[in-house]
Image: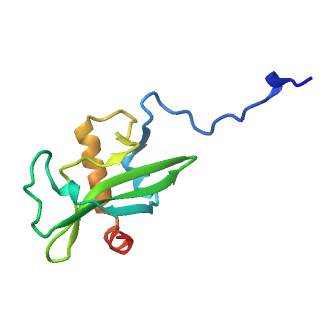
Amino acid sequence: MNNYFATSFAKPAYVYTRDYYIRITERKLSAVQLLHACSARDDAVLMPPCTLASHDNGLRGGYTEWVGQHGSVQLSLAWDWVIHNDGYISALPGVSPRTNVLVVSPGGYDPSPEESTRALWAYIETLAWQKQVIQAI
């Protein structure tokens, strides 16, 4: 006779919060080494909803995603980018980064969404991501 109730499950390495964000301070985030996961061209990131204002202006756009480890959890950080007519590539700060990271205060308090977004953009600015994106597309 099989004893289906005797099966044991490993205890999870991380207990997720109810909103599934990984809470981390700016200092700890700066120590995380991100690796390029993917990048793709998607010119739709250049167009505001319901308009074609950015269409056919010679710009190219897309998105990129990067991942890293913080202890036993995996962080994901993605943002949109644009390649300008002179070949320079930059992030598009008009759209918040997509992430499972919530940058908290040194005391561990949740910030406002704007404060967390500002901290993520500051972190992204420290990364040398442009060359990886160009190579991927």
Q: Is residue 2 left or right of residue 27?
A: right
Pick the residue in front: 74 or 119: 74
For the C terminus, the image quarter is bottom left
For image coordinates 22% across by 55% down, the residue present is 45
Q: Residue furthest right?
A: 1
Q: Is residue 58 above or below residue 28?
A: below
The image shows residue 14 at horizontal and vertical percentages of 57, 37
Quarter residue 113 falls in: top left
For the N terminus, the image quarter is top right
The image shows residue 13 at horizontal and vertical percentages of 62, 39
For image coordinates 10% across by 59% down, the residue present is 54
Q: Is residue 87 above or below residue 69?
A: below
Q: Is residue 48 left or right of residue 24?
A: left
For image coordinates 36% across by 33% down, the residue present is 109
Q: How many marks?
A: 0
The image shows residue 44 at horizontal and vertical percentages of 21, 55
Q: Is residue 44 visible?
A: yes
The image shows residue 52 at horizontal and vertical percentages of 9, 54
For image coordinates 17% across by 50% down, the residue present is 94
Q: Is residue 92 visible?
A: no
Q: Is residue 89 left or right of residue 33?
A: left
Q: Is residue 136 above or below residue 77?
A: below
Q: Residue furthest bottom?
A: 86
